[in-house]
Image (tube, rainbow, N blue to C red):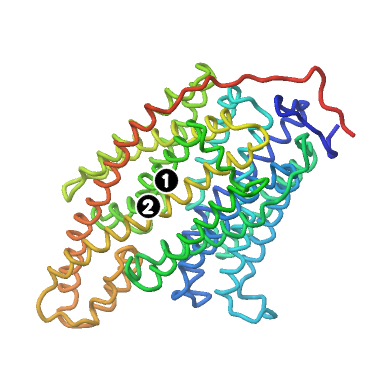
């Protein structure tokens, strides 16, 4: 029988679910993970059609930025709130909000009663969708930690890794197919049936669990100051590639973020129930994992966005194939997650996976750092598979290690902190590496511009990230002018040379970072994974 009422668990034990509850809970969590993974990749292939229909090219980065802002902020806040008030309500609220926002995103531009245009409607709804995603994604692995002991989780990591990998590979293809055969709106509407299944499964089968203990209070000062720090930080990192680090806009935002970080840290030392208990980082396992996942986010995830650029701009892979360019990396990540799950379960230890994964990521990044104009497609694929395998080995390690070390009353905050640091790290990586790439790209490209080239012809070459999609337009435009196509081919040749040198810089920087991170994983304390401690009888339903 489904348990819908309160179930309490003590700090020393885990909840024992009946078989229907276990199947329903795992099914609901997998549907939610499928929802989140597909959404991260399916919208990208539909975006050109969205921009064209909603006339929003000048605001297209905000479709992703709004989602990033709200989802990053939501993860630590609702992770902590779930420690106080239980997981079920927040998970259901997040998933429901995500589904409702998906429907609104699909309807953007048709809601004429709203006082702003379709593109701004989409940006607003993507922000709401990100809030739901942060609540939902942040709690998936916390709930797994409630149900399974650290030693048991390896058996289930493979299932979740397979769902994530499958969805990530399916997303770009599904987004293109839905857009071509129906509408870009279908890329959002497809979330509805999956999300509804997730809500139903969790509502019916996952018990509403609360930790016994003293009354606990919300850290409003921590919530406010964290938002005040993260929002300007992410905005500054998003805009730095367009305006530069020294621009007043970026510098002022970074200044505000620094001040608010100080306010946040001070408020956490005074709060009775801090949003992110700083005492957690006194634990060497949690502190090392937080630093390691930040470096992984910056060094690996910060580079992933530029691999398709190398394949399109240097190797000449067509833009129509761009949706599947990262498939080898995703397949390697799925395989690595399956292996690490089995290793953790059999050995009762996470350190072998951590060390092996860090070495493989470093090897993969070193292979990327060696790429140049003579590189062939298979060389990139080999690097992707190796780096992806390392990512797959590493990513579950941080969650398992942190949950194994954290007190149960702080399980949500500790688990959410790993996702939070990974997200911040990847955003920092994209900004820093993007700045390095563009600086080198512009200096190299400008040095090779033929004399007498009109400035108007160079406008499209300011952002190499857009050139793949714009090439048909450029050929049509340059073809109208005598001598235009030879000039275009010369400029595109300059682009290729500039990209090779710019991308090499960021791949080398990332390789150095990931090689250094091996030492961090070597000093990671290996705490034996706890087994299950069951109560004598199943928890009663009240």
Circle 2/circle 1 CB separation < 8 Å = yes
Residue at the farthest right position: 542
- Give the x, y percent position of residue 333: 44, 36
Residue 361 left/right relative to 411: left
Q: Dot 2 corresponds to which residue?
A: 429
At label 1, counting other C-alpha atoms closer than 10 Å, the crowd grade (few under 14, some 14-19, many 20 or more) is many
> For the C terminus, which image quadrant?
top right
Residue drawn at (52%, 41%) of the image: 418
Can you give x and y, in whole percent of width and height, for residue 175 in the image? 52, 56
Q: In this view, does 342 lie above or below 121?
A: above
Where 53 sits versus 257, above or below?
A: below
Eyeballing the image, is 61 above or below 520?
below
Give SS at disc 1: helix
Q: In this view, does 4 lie to the left or right of 356?
A: right
Name the residue beneath numbered marker 1.
297
Instruction: Indicate which disc residue 161 carries.
Output: none
* Residue lying farthest to the front in this orientation: 270
Q: Nearer the viewer, residue 497 or 135?
A: 135
Q: Looking at the figure, which quarter contains the N terminus?
A: top right
Instruction: State how far apart marks 2 and 1 are (Cα).
Output: 7 Å
Task: Locate residue 320, reporting x and y percent.
Answer: 38, 58
Q: Where is residue 112 in the image (x, y as percent from the top left)?
A: 67, 80
Determine the residue positioned at 70% across, 25% down: 12
Work out whether residue 372 or residue 79 is closer to the camera in this orientation and state it: 79
Q: Earlier in the sequence, mark 2 or mark 1?
A: 1
Q: What element carries label 2?
A: helix
Q: Is residue 445 above or below residue 306?
A: below
Residue drawn at x 25%, y 39% is 367
């Amino acid at each position: 029988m489904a348990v819908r009422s309160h179930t309490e668990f003590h700090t020393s034990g885990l909840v024992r679910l009946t078989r229907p509850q276990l199947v329903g809970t795992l099914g609901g969590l997998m549907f939610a993970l499928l929802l989140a993974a597909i959404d991260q990749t399916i919208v990208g292939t539909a975006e050109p059609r969205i921009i064209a229909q909603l006339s929003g090219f000048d605001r297209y980065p905000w479709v992703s930025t709004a989602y990033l802002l709200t989802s990053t902020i939501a993860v630590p806040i609702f992770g902590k709130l779930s420690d106080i008030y239980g997981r079920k309500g927040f998970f259901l609220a997040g998933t429901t909000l995500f589904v409702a926002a998906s429907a609104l995103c699909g309807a953007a531009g048709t809601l004429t009663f709203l006082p702003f245009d379709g593109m701004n409607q989409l940006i607003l709804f993507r922000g709401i969708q990100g809030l739901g995603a942060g609540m939902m994604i942040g709690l998936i692995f916390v709930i797994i930690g409630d149900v399974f002991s650290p030693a048991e989780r390896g058996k289930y990591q493979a299932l979740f890794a397979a769902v994530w990998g499958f969805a990530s590979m399916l997303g770009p293809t599904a987004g293109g197919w839905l857009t071509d055969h129906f509408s870009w709106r279908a890329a959002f509407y497809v979330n509805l049936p999956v999300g509804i299944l997730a809500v139903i499964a969790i509502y019916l089968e996952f018990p509403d669990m609360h930790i016994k203990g003293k009354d606990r209070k919300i850290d409003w000062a921590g919530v406010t100051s964290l938002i005040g720090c993260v929002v300007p930080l992410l905005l500054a990192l998003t805009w730095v590639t367009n305006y530069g680090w020294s621009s007043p806009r970026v510098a002022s935002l970074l200044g505000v973020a620094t001040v608010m970080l100080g306010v946040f840290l001070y408020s956490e030392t005074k709060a009775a129930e801090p949003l992110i208990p700083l005492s957690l980082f006194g634990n060497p396992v949690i502190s090392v994992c937080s630093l390691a996942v930040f470096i992984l986010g910056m060094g690996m995830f910060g580079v992933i966005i530029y691999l398709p650029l190398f394949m399109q701009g240097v190797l000449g892979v067509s833009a129509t194939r761009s949706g599947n360019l990262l498939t080898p990396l995703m397949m390697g990540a799925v395989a690595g997650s399956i292996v690490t799950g089995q290793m953790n379960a059999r050995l009762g230890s996470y350190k072998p996976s951590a060390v092996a994964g860090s070495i493989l990521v470093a090897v993969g990044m070193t292979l990327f750092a060696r790429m140049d104009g003579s590189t062939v497609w298979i060389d990139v694929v080999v690097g992707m598979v190796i780096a992806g395998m390392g990512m797959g080995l590493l990513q579950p390690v941080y969650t398992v290690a942190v949950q194994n070390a954290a007190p149960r009353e702080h399980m949500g905050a500790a688990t959410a902190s790993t996702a939070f640091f990974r997200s911040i790290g990847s955003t920092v990586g994209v900004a820093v590496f993007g700045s390095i790439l563009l600086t080198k790209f512009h200096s190299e490209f400008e040095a090779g511009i033929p004399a007498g080239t009109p400035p108007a012809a160079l406008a499209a070459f300011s952002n190499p990230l857009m050139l793949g999609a714009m090439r048909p337009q450029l050929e049509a435009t340059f073809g109208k002018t005598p001598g235009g196509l030879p000039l275009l081919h010369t400029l595109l040749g300059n682009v290729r040379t500039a990209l090779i040198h710019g991308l090499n810089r960021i791949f080398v920087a990332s390789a150095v970072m990931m090689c250094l991170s091996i030492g961090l994983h070597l000093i990671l304390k290996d705490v034996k994974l706890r087994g299950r401690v069951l109560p004598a009888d199943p928890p009663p339903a009240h």
